[in-house]
Amino acid sequence: PGPLVEITKENHPVDASQDQQMGSESGTRPLDSPPPTLAFPSISTADFQFNIERASEIIVETVEEFINKLGNARVVLVDLSRGSKILSLVKTKAAIKNIDPKKFFTFVGDITKLRSGGGLHCNVIANAANWRLKPGGGGVNAAIYNAAGPELDAATKNRAGSLAPGKALTVPLPSTSSLFSKEGVTHVIHVLGPNMNPKRPNCLKDDYNKGTKVLREAYLSLFENFASIVK
Ligand code: AR6
């Protein structure tokens, strides 16, 4: 299959970089040494059909809990289009909570082309994975596996054969992976969120008590994994 997303004026990362809530990427720091940065997609809110309003609460709460443990590192929520509902909800909620916009912001672009297409260097990216840790499928999982090449599947299989809901798994990328060489991504963190889609395994059948717990766990596990890489 070809690229999932056509870069159009609507979603062009450069155009879209205005969505970024911080100033220019260069700042006072030399361009070749950006702070450690995690880019992550909104886990479970597309194919897994988790409620977007509830997810936005959980993202902002867990970021707020974690942000001070991350030193100078940054975390960035990414989505494909400027009209993304999750990005606008999270942006508003983060502003209300006064979360430092230099440490946490939203960005419109393809998570597999953040440096080349959007000028944002993220050394770590998160993937909304499936429990079997299989490449393909759809959504961000397919995009990341396509962009990383077979190296990601091999490196993932090396570490684990499956993932439980609420858990995250860090996979260091070999330098031969094109995500490493083209985008400077050194690690992919697979995350398995709660599934509310009856057509997918382990559907929670609208149990948002369980779902909220699992999505919180998933984000906390993601940020803990990122903190271990940064250390
Ligand atoms: N760049 C940035 N964000 C993206 C991209 C991309 N290239 N592609 C999608 N998104 P989803 P889930 C956003 O469905 O709901 C897979 O098939 C998208 O707009 O990828 O957790 C897996 O194998 C949305 O905001 O993940 C699992 O079976 C977010 O990424 C299942 O789907 C997550 O959408 C996981 O479903």
Image: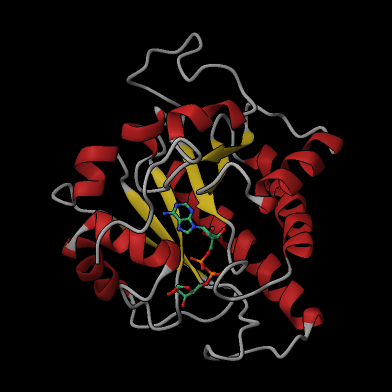
Residue 199 image-quadrant placement: bottom right
Coordinates of residue 135 in the picture (x, y in percent)? 30, 73
Residue 181 appears at what percent x and percent y?
A: 19, 40
Image: 145 above or below 10: below
Q: Is residue 142 visible?
A: yes
Residue 49, x across and y down, in percent: 64, 74
Q: Is residue 72 above or below residue 210?
A: above
- Give the quarter of the figure containing the N terminus: bottom left
Q: Nearer the viewer, residue 92 or 213?
A: 92
Colour option used: secondary structure
Choose between 179 and 37: the one closer to the eye. Answer: 179
Q: Residue furthest front?
A: 9
Quarter of the image for residue 71 reads: top right
Q: Say which quarter of the image contains residue 58.
A: bottom right
x, y percent for residue 185: 32, 44
Taking 92 as reference, is 228 above or below it?
Answer: below
In front of the other: 18 or 165: 18
Residue at 52%, 51% (x, y): give it.
40
Residue most extreme to the right: 96
Instruction: Point out the residue furthest to the top here.
Output: 28
- For image coordinates 50% across by 49% down, the residue present is 80
Q: Is residue 169 visible?
A: no
